[in-house]
Image (cartoon, rainbow, N blue to C red):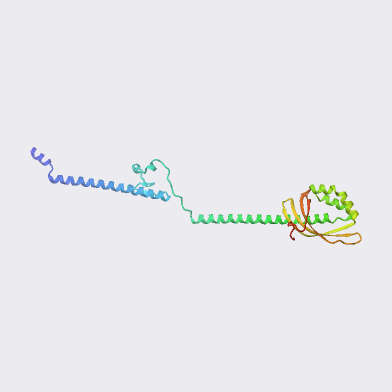
Amino acid sequence: MTLRRRAAAIPTHDDLSTADAEAAATLASVRAEQARLRANQLRRHAETVAHAASGRAPASIPLDDGKTARDGFGQNDDDTAPASLAAGSPRRFQSRRPRRRTLVVAIAVLCVCTSFGASGAMWWSHRTTVEKRQRTAEFTKAARAEITELMSIDFTKARDGVQRVIDDSTGQFKNQFQASADNLIAGLEQSKVTTSVTVNAVAVQGMTGDSAVVLVAATSQASSLQGAQRDAQEFRVILSLQRADGRLKMSRVEFVSQGTSAAPHTR
C-alpha cells in the first residue's frame, strides 16, 4: 500500500514537460512585458527631447498603467530620467519666431517714429531758415540806415548829425568818431556842402545772433550852397554791426576800393 502511494506521487515524464512549458511561457510573458515598458520609456524620452528642442512644454503622456506623466517621465521612472534633468540644470529653449501680428505692429511703430523724426527735422530746418532770413533782413535794414546817416550829414545841422552817428556807434569806432567830432563839425560848416547818399546793394557776409559783417555799395552826390553839384562818387564799405543797448550799432567802418573782391552782391 505504501509503495503504491509513493509511486503515485512521483510525476511522470508528461507532467514534467507540461510544467516546463508553462514556466517557459510565463518567463516569456514577463520578458515581453518588460520589453514593452522599456519601449514606452524610450518613446516618452524621445518625445520629451523633441518638445524641448521646439521650445514648447510636452503634453501630458498617458502611461499604460492609467497614470499621467509630465515631461515624458512617470513617477517611478527616476532611474531613466536624463542626467541634466536629474541634476536640476535649467533647460534651454529656442526663441520663438515673432508672430505676423507682432511684426506688423513693430513695423507700424517704426513708421510712426520715423515720420515724427522726419517732421521734427523739417520743422527745425524751417525754423532755422526763417530765423536766418529775419536776422538777415534786420542787419540789411540797419546797414542801409547807418551808412546813409554816416555819409549824408547836413552842414546846417552838423552837430546834430554827428551826435546821431555817435549814438548809433559802439566800441572802438565810437571812441574814434567821438574824438574827432569837433573837427568834423567845423569842416562841414565851413564847406557848406550837402551830401545825399543812395545805397545800391547790401550783402550780409557773416552773422550771429547779435553781430554781423555787411558789405555795402552806395553812391554819394554832393552839392554846394549855390546849387553846384559835384560828380557822383561810388564807394564800398565793410560795415560791422553789433547789438548794444537793444539796438544794432556800428562797431567798425572800413572803406574799400572798387576793385576789391569783397564787393557785395546786389540784394
Using residue 89 as the reference point, say whether residue 37 is left or right of it: left
| Quadrant in which the N terminus is drawn | top left
Q: Residue at x 80, y 55 (%)?
A: 147
Say whether residue 206 is visible.
yes
Q: Residue furthest right?
A: 226
Instruction: Tell which of 121 and 258 is nearer to you.
Output: 258
Q: Residue at x 15, y 44 (%)?
A: 16
Residue 233: image x %, image y %? 82, 60
Using residue 171 as the reference point, say whether residue 35 is left or right of it: left
Q: Is residue 257 above or below residue 170?
A: below
Residue 33: image x %, image y %? 27, 47
Residue 24: image x %, image y %? 20, 46
Q: Is residue 85 above or below residue 187?
A: above
Instruction: Tell which of 203 and 8 is nearer to you.
Output: 203
| Quadrant in which the C terminus is drawn | bottom right
Instruction: Tell which of 12 and 160 is nearer to you.
Output: 160
Q: Residue at x 41, y 49 (%)?
A: 53
Say whether residue 248 is visible.
no
Badge count: 0
Q: Residue at x 15, y 46 (%)?
A: 17
